[in-house]
Structures are given as structure tokens and as C-alpha cells.
Image (cartoon, rainbow, N blue to C red):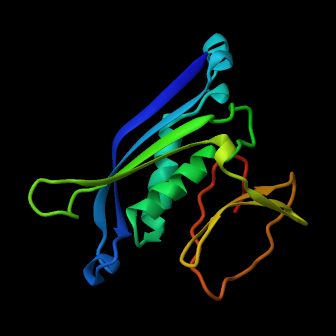
Amino acid sequence: MMTTISIASLQVSCIIGVLEHERTTKQLITIDVEITFDGRRAATSESIEFTHDYSAIAGQIEFILSNGEFMLIESAAHLILRHLLLPPTDKRPRILTAKVTVTKADALSGTALAAVTIQGSEADFVYAREKKSWGYVDIIEETSRLGLYRLTLSPEATLPPHYHNQMLESELMMSDGLLS
């Protein structure tokens, strides 16, 4: 039994584009997402821990786009797809397929809309994992301009203070129980 969750017309302001003014001014883009997974356990248990919370997915997409800077809408769509297809670390089922459409309303003159759609399955991607003294890092995507990582801390572990010489860092906590 396949379950599909769709998020339609999620609007996010972000830096996206190759033109000079697009590199300094955020633009409103629209994202449509569709994911499929085996939803039987969620349906029979009526427990949100066995499904994918569309509100959380929307928040994660908004965080990724508003904190990243993209040259191409293809890059933004690809990064979202890789994030969605990353295997979960909790009781949620794996997302088997995902489809992401990013629409940039101001790319063309008049009322025409420019959009890119990318779709894939869990088998399309391999994710590197680095073991650390405090847990591990899943490398979702690394480009010359952007990196997206999921850090998983071991119980009672502390993330050591650190800094990056070549990038700015934004962090999104994806579960409860962390102290800052």
C-alpha cells in the first residue's frame, strides 16, 4: 500500500539566480513536493511517528531554501530531493520516491512561469556518512557553493565548539531533547 503526501504552492524567499541583482535580492519561489512511502503502519496505528509530518517537511524545505544561495533552480530542486530521500533516523518509513517542482515567477516576462521538476527514488542516491567522536554526519550534498549535512549526536554527547573558514553555518534542530 503506497501513501502519497503532497505539499502544493509552498512559497519561500531565497537568493536564486545568476544575474547580478538576483545574487543580492531574495526572490519568491514556489515549491511543490510529492513523496511516496509505505503508510500502512501509520494508518493502522494512527501515530504520527510512523508517517511523514507535512508541516515538518515544509519547515525543512523553507529552512534549506531561505538559508542557502542558489545559482540555478535545478540546484535548489536537486538539494530538496536529496534531503527528502535521505533515510530517516527514527520510526518513519523510508521515502521511496519523491518529486520536487520549483517555480520562479519572475524569471520570464509577462505571466509566463519558469519551473524545474526533478524526481527520483531512494535507489538513485548514495549518502556518505562520517563517524565522529560525538556521533556521525550524513553528507546530503556538497557543492562548491553549498553543503547540506545531517548531524546525529550520540546520547549524552556534546558537539565540540568549531568554526568554518570558508562558509556560513545555519542549523535546524530536527528532534527534541537537545540543549544549547
Residue 19 in the image, given as x and y percentages of width and height: 29, 79
Residue 131 in the image, given as x and y percentages of width and height: 87, 63
- In this rendered view, identify the residue nearer to me: 45 or 121: 121
In this figure, what is the number of numbered marks?
Answer: 0
Please state if 52 lies on the left or on the right of 109 as rendered. right
In the displayed image of the protein, which residue is found farthest to the top? 44
Q: Residue at x 58, y 78 (%)?
A: 144
Q: Residue at x 62, y 45 (%)?
A: 85
- Above or below for 84 versus 2: below
**Quarter of the figure with the C terminus:** bottom right
- Above or below for 106 versus 113: below
Please state if 62 lies on the left or on the right of 38 as rendered. left
Tell me if I can see residue 61 in this picture. Answer: yes
- In this rendered view, identify the residue nearer to me: 72 or 86: 72
- In this rendered view, identify the residue nearer to me: 92 or 113: 113
Please state if 129 lies on the left or on the right of 119 as rendered. right
Residue 11 in the image, given as x and y percentages of width and height: 32, 50
In the displayed image of the protein, which residue is found farthest to the right? 133
- In this rendered view, identify the residue nearer to me: 58 or 154: 58
Q: Residue at x 40, y 67 (%)?
A: 72
In the displayed image of the protein, which residue is found farthest to the bottom? 165
Please state if 53 lies on the left or on the right of 126 as rendered. left
In the displayed image of the protein, which residue is found farthest to the front? 124
Q: Quadrant of residue 46?
A: top right
Q: Residue at x 20, y 63 (%)?
A: 106
Residue 101 in the image, given as x and y percentages of width and height: 39, 47
- Above or below for 44 versus 7: above
**Quarter of the figure with the N terminus:** top right
- Above or below for 109 versus 49: below
Tell me if I can see residue 175 in this picture. Answer: no
